[in-house]
Amino acid sequence: MIEIHRLSNGIQVVLEPMEHVHSASIGIYVKVGSAYETRENNGIAHVVEHMLFKGTKTRTAKEQATAFAKIGGDVNAYTSKEETCYYAMVLDEHLYEVIELLGDMICNPRFEPNDLKKELEVILEEIDMYQDSPEDLAIEHLQEISLPTSPLGYLISGKKETVSNFQREHVVSFMEDFYTAERIVISIAGNFQKKEILELLEEQFGMIKSIGRKFVRQSGTFSPAFASLHKDTEQTHVTIGFMGSGYQSEEKYAQMVFDQCFGDSDDSRLFQKLREDLSLVYSVYSFCNTYEETGIFQIYGAMNQQKVGRCVHEIGLILQDLRKNGITKEELSCAKERIRSELLMGMDSTENRMGQNGKSLLLSGTLQTTLQVVDQVLRVTKEDVDQYIRKYINPNSSSLVLVGNQTQEQDDILKKIWKNQYQ
């Protein structure tokens, strides 16, 4: 049985006991990411995440890393648009140790100026790495140009000219503003003793202040845009984007089903047409980025630059048919069963259960279990998906980004196809 508790300072704790396993997973979820930044400090949430692994008031970075290594398992962190998470999956006998280690790194960071200077160099290398990936570059640039007035369009890593100028006081101030109890959810799933765990969490995290800075995020609407970025690549990387459903909307379930039907599986329309039937691509897929109030549905493919026009045109034909005729009942049934299978098989993992519980409570304010998600997906009808397609997947309101070696003439042709709704 899943239970929600509160520490004395207001931190929410969601516990899911799994007595039959030998492991436990913990996630410290903080409601902060690039969507809570400004253009002046874009990238700082990601810097904070990195710096928490650079030592505490009681441990050096080396001692910290060694302590994590001694308990085995998997310890890591990530920063996204709307949340930052510090997580670990360990044998159940090591859960108490990892809670103490995570508590120490979050509540007692050192933020030594010299460590920050060195870590910023590492992050600049990470930014360069993403810039060298045409796939990542295309996908991120589409989000940036499609949400020009919203922090959701900011790069999670930030831009080099901004990140390189961060000082210790910037990092400390940002953490004090956002790493507060009202913005934190701790999620644990696995084999543990509830009473002892709650006492330890109170000891490690109960001193975090309850309330921080009141931040009002700028709202922004999806703005159709075209861009071509020139890089010396063998293939041209193409991504097409549409406004999508947000995390708070019930339409997100129809969006999940549509994604499966359209491009998120080997028997999807996108894969079967462009790769299997026409042999135009090796890599092609669709996915949806779902945020609290909105989302972006994206299509990605990579192909020889001489095939770009044909690929984009064929995608347009698939979209045209879907808007006219919708999905089939067989596609609906297969998509729902794939989603159901993936989610239910994922329940064998303490990490998946921990993640579902923690993220849903953090972003929606209510706990939504995996079984509840499955139930909602199974309720999706053909009419729900067809309505989603007509509302969101509109070629007249889309963005298109190219990354590759295309000529100006090829760019002009693709821009014309984009303006003509991929016809």
Image (spheres, rainbow, N blue to C red):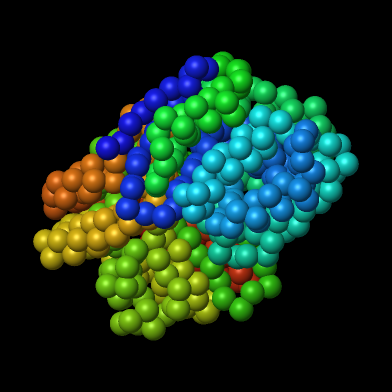
Taking depth in this image into account, of 122 and 16 the one nearest to the observer is 16
Number of numbered tags placed on the structure image: 0
> Residue, x 83% and y 43% (percent of image)?
115
Residue 186: x, y in percent? Answer: 48, 34
142 and 26: which is toward the camera: 26
Percent across and percent down for residue 116 are: 81, 41
Judged left or right of residue 259, residue 91 is: right
| Quadrant position of residue 230 | bottom right
Tell me if residue 126 comes above or below residue 101 in the rendering: below
- Residue in the image at 42% along x and 42% along y: 192
**Residue pushed farthest left?**
329
Residue 278 visible in the current orientation? yes
**Residue 57 place in picture, x, y as percent:** 78, 33
x 38%, y 69%: residue: 313
Residue 189 at x, y percent in the picture: 40, 44
Side of 135 relative to 25 (left or right): right
Residue 164: tell me if it is visible: no
Question: 76 or 423: which is nearer to us?
Answer: 76
State the image quarter where residue 214 is shown: top right
Residue 307's place in the image compared with 73, above or below, is below
The image shows residue 51, relative to residue 175, as above or below, that is: below
Task: Classify residue 123 as left or right of residue 165.
Answer: left
Image quarter in which the C terminus is found: bottom left
Q: Is residue 296 left or right of residue 183?
A: left
